[in-house]
Amino acid sequence: MTNVLVATSSRHGATAQIARAIGEVLTDNGLDVDVLRIEDVRDVTPYDAYVLGSAVYMGRWLPEARAFVEEHRELLATRPAWFFSSGPIGSQPAGAEVDTADVDALVHPRDHHVFGGRLALGELTRRERLFARLLRVQDGDYREWHTVTAWATAIARSLVPSPV
């Protein structure tokens, strides 16, 4: 059985919800999956493949996610890996203003998908609310769950051997 680590860095939980959805799809396709917060991962060696994600703030992955990739880059580069980002909100198209070249260059994942994010003003810090107001960003959930499911299904199909 293929062991897959789905690990994320999520500030307010929206990216973690995407990770759980990905984990469910992978599990439903016969893979052995652990879905963890990046800071809770103790050992990456038992896994055969990796799906790593981060919330995107100011166009970049969160520092702990970038540090995780940096720390484990040698092993991650030798096994199948996929990255995802969560963050564009409002009328921004997925991928707009997201710069992940630094983490992608370390591992060269098979794919790096950018999903829309979620903004719940009530969950934000005072500083984050100020930025949201300055940028005129509206509350809303911009994640497209059918896209998350399709992407995770494609990953599963690449990891699960076809029946003979």
Image: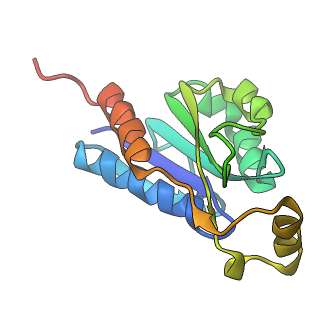
Q: Quadrant of the N terminus?
A: top left
Quarter of the figure with residue 24: bottom left
Residue projecting furthest to the left: 164
Residue 12 coordinates in the image, percent (x, y): 65, 70
Residue projecting furthest to the top: 164
User: How is the protein colored in the picture?
Assistant: rainbow
Residue 118 coordinates in the image, percent (x, y): 61, 62
Who is closer to the viewer here, 78 or 122? 122
Q: Quick check: 3 left or right of 123? A: left
Looking at the image, residue 46 lies above or below residue 124: above
Who is closer to the viewer here, 8 or 33? 8
Looking at the image, residue 8 lies above or below residue 66: below
Quarter of the figure with residue 8: bottom right
Q: Quadrant of the C terminus?
A: top left
Residue 102 coordinates in the image, percent (x, y): 80, 32
Quarter of the figure with residue 30: top left
Q: Quick check: 7 left or right of 33? A: right
Q: Is residue 151 visible?
A: yes
State the residue at coordinates (71%, 76%).
121
Q: Is residue 35 visible?
A: no
State the residue at coordinates (74%, 25%).
105
The mark total stands at 0
State the residue at coordinates (59%, 27%).
109
Residue 91 coordinates in the image, percent (x, y): 67, 48
Looking at the image, residue 97 lies above or below residue 27: above
State the residue at coordinates (56%, 56%).
142
Who is closer to the viewer here, 146 or 99? 146
